[in-house]
Image: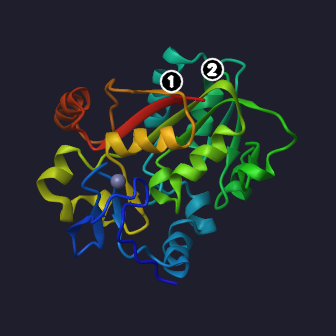
Amino acid sequence: MTRLVDRCPLCDASPSRNASAALNLSVCPQCGLGFRTPQPTDQELELIYREAYSDEEVAAGSETMAGTTDSIATQYAGQLSRLEPLSGRRVVDYGAGLGSMSRALSQAGAAVIAVDPFSARELRKQGIDAHDTLRALPGEELYDGCTAIEVFEHLRAPWETMAEIRSVLRPGGFLLITTPNIQGLKPRLALDSWSEAVDQAHLFLFSPKSLELALDEAGYSRWKRLRGPVKFSSGGAANAARAVLQITGLDGQLRYIAWS
Ligand SMILES: [Zn+2]
């Protein structure tokens, strides 16, 4: 079923500005959340994911879907460990994908439990403790933290999943989030050609305000935007330019840590 969304699904503001008719993307005038109108159907999404997460792609460690390389994941783990020591901590890697963040957390000394419906089977073959869903996690245990790297933009109701994650965190446990930033420089200049917006599997594109609203809605008590530089795979000049944007908050990505 195609779902038409004419009010902001997060803050209920109306009417929402149709920011790009070509991409079926609306932007909330109040909280800045970008969302598909209409949302793709389950069948349409399944097609996109089946292609990106075929067994061959996952086994080959293809980066077509998961752009998070081991090098990037190691930088995230490094930034995280400056705020939350990881050694000996029990951390869920939600939406683990091809496992780069799980490996980086392990290397930093954390006991990692990966969650991903598409890749759990393959991750288990690699020796990672992996489960299909949060509900499939063993026992009633609470975790010290969770990471969700480039995940929430894919979900039907990200704020509900944030709340579900919070329910498995101990009091004061952390959630590390990375997700595209719709208020970055690129989408401000040319939304229609911004790759994160072109990707129809991205159902929501957050602004800082809408991400903070979602965290608040999900019951997190506090949060902090991380602005330290992260080097992606492109060349030195591109990384230098990106570092400036990261510091000013205009880069293409939101990185947040929230506490339950
Ligand atoms: Zn809104």
Q: Position of residue 222 (x, y in %)?
A: 49, 26
Q: Residue 258, percent across and down? A: 51, 30
Left or right: 240, with 168 as reference point: left
Classify mark 2: helix, strand or loop.
loop
Q: Quadrant of residue 173?
A: top right
The quarter holding residue 106 reads: top right
Q: Residue at x 45, y 22 (%)?
A: 79
Q: Which residue is mark 2?
A: 86
Can you tell which mark lies on residue 229? none
Furthest-right residue in this view: 139
Residue drawn 59% across the image and 59% down it = 58
Residue 117 percent location from the top left of the image: 67, 60
* Res 96 visible: no
Residue at figure coordinates x 11%, y 53% from the top left: 189
Does the image show residue 168? Answer: yes
Q: Is residue 4 left or right of residue 170?
A: left
The span from disc 2 to disc 1 (Cα, nearest Å) is 8 Å
- Labels 2 and 1 touching (C-beta < 8 A): yes
- Picture residue at 88% right of the left edge, 41% below the top: 139
Residue at far bottom of view: 1
Q: Earlier in the sequence, mark 2 or mark 1?
A: 1
The foreground one among 111 and 142 is 142
Q: Is residue 244 left or right of residue 211?
A: left
| Left or right of 116 in this view: 155 | left
Disc 2, ligand 1: is the CB inside 8 Å?
A: no
Between 35 and 101, the residue placed more toward the observer is 35
Label disc, if present, on residue 80 of the rendered structure: 1
